[in-house]
Image: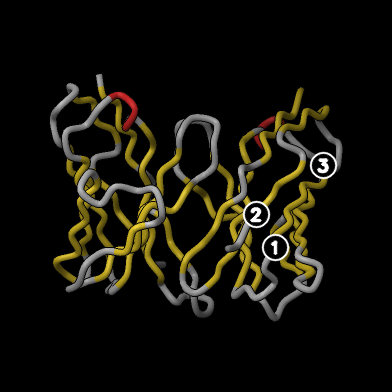
Amino acid sequence: KQEVTQIPAALSVPEGENLVLNCSFTDSAIYNLQWFRQDPGKGLTSLLLIQSSQREQTSGRLNASLDKSSGRSTLYIAASQPGDSATYLCAVGNNNDMRFGAGTRLTVKP
Amino acid sequence: GAVVSQHPSWVICKSGTSVKIECRSLDFQATTMFWYRQFPKQSLMLMATSNEGSKATYEQGVEKDKFLINHASLTLSTLTVTSAHPEDSSFYICSAPTGAGGANVLTFGAGSRLTVL
């Protein structure tokens, strides 16, 4: 059974800092990996999707990498802003469903 | 792009009542939909896989008689929380495979927040 772990569980940084969120998974036979953002009391916003054949995806200040063989993905956020404060979820796709990590709660202080 | 619509977005009910949550795929057909549950400060957990025209598949530990799933058409799946109790208060979210950008890409609804008094 796929298990997804996210480290750290919470992170607080000053505005402008670059940061990295980590995600690890136990079964490397994945179809894709997706990073989501969730604001308090809200649904999910998809940030980046990496197919199993890809190694990274970039969108604006966000860059996600995937190392399938080692079961790891990172989400890099450049020049963080207070508006980036949210919970970031990593989800791994296997056989048409997805397994989620517990998330990293990010706070960016002005 | 593909959109998954959930209704209601939030609901408050009395203990013992049943609540129905709808998940609709707009502009595309979904033979399969997934239902997740999220308790406060926890991650989303897959509850069940809804299959059009057949019985849903439930994850271990999820009571199928408690959480009734009906996937009556290619665009609609419903989750009914029967005889709801306060411990059922949670955020419920559905998703459907869209195939956009490649196989096995899931699009999520906005979620439904259930509060049982």
Q: Amino acid at mark 3?
A: Ala
The picture places residue A28, in percent across and down from the top left corner, at: 70, 72
- Residue A1 in the image: state x and y as whole percent: 58, 63
Q: Could you say which is closer to the camera, residue B66 or residue A90?
A: B66
| Quarter that holds the C terminus of chain A | top right
Subunit of label 3:
A
Disc 1 target residue: A26
Q: Is residue B96 visible?
A: yes
- Cβ atoms at labels 1 and 3 below 8 Å apart: no
Chain of the residue on which disc 2 is drawn: A
Label of residue A82 in the image: none
| Comes first in the chain, label 2 or label 3 | 2
Label 1 residue SS: loop
Badge 1: chain ID = A
| Depicted B94 relative to depicted B9: above or below | below
Residue B23, percent from left and from top: 26, 55
Q: Are marks 2 and 1 in contact (CB under 8 Å)?
A: yes
Q: Residues within 10 Å of mark 1 (few under 14, many from 20)?
A: some
Residue bearing the label numbered 3: A79
Mark 2: which secondary structure?
strand
Label 2: which residue? A4
Disc 2 to disc 3, C-alpha distance: 27 Å
